[in-house]
Image: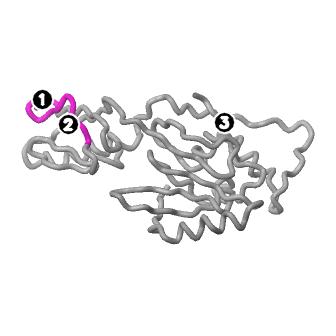
Amino acid sequence: MRLTLCAIALSISLFGASGAWAQPTVGVQPVNLSIDTSAPNPNASITPLDHLEITVFREPDLSAADVMVDESGHLELPLVGSVLAAGKSTDELSDEIAKRLLEYVKTPEVSVTLKQAASRRVTVAGSVIQPGVYPIEGRLTLLQAVALARGPSQVASLDDTFIFRVHDGKRSVAKFDLGAIAKGKAPDPEVISGDTVSIGSSGFKTAWRDVLDTVRSFNVFRVLP
């Protein structure tokens, strides 16, 4: 599934502070930047319930053909013990395991391969053109998540963009300015599986205030790019 990320930046540039759409210049064409959300990404963050293949070269007893990351994000390996895998790329996890094996193996060479990815989905709601639940593969940023929903609607309040997250049974929320992110004035945070992205509406401030009142009951978290 190929989507256009620049469409969201274009829509933001045409979106006025008053909540109305500006008229595009004659002859302006949409700019396409393809995002292949179905292709495996070797730098994708490992998530709970992923199945990994761990290979320690010349050390078959320390290798694992199929090991599953548990719900807490950890996996168990011979000699190494419990390792936090969730949130790391396969390269980062390879380096971590190799460091731990230095005590037992001289110059260990470790390879980690994503054998089977757990089902990943993100929900995009609020003032977007096509709200819904979308499957994701690999790393996904906030801009890309909104692009999955075909961009913000005409009444979107871009500075009222939220990521809702549940981790270890705790609910958290963080607020972002999507307009600033699209212009490169703020970092584009990563969205992970299970997150809900929601954009407020400039046309329904009262209703959105009710949402904000609910948000205050959440733990505020900070998402790094």
Looking at the rendered structure, the secondary structure element under dot 2 is loop
Q: For residue 55, what is the image quadrant?
A: top left
Tell me, yes or no, whether the highlighted magenta stretch contains residue 61.
yes
Please indicate whether residue 197 sits to the left or right of residue 73 in the image. Answer: right
Q: Mark 1 vs mark 2: which is more N-terminal? A: 1
Q: State the extent of the magenta-drawn residues as a range.
A: 57-69
Q: Residues within 10 Å of mark 1 (few under 14, many from 20)?
A: few
The residues bearing labels 3 and 2 have C-alpha atoms spaced at a distance of: 39 Å
The residues bearing labels 1 and 2 have C-alpha atoms spaced at a distance of: 9 Å
Q: Position of residue 152 (x, y in %)?
A: 70, 48
Residue at 16%, 39% in the rendered image: 108
User: Which residue bears the numbered disc 1?
Assistant: 58
Please indicate whether residue 61 sits to the left or right of residue 214 in the image. Answer: left
The kind of residue on which mark 2 rests is Glu
User: Which residue bears the numbered disc 2?
Assistant: 109
Above or below for 185 versus 50: below
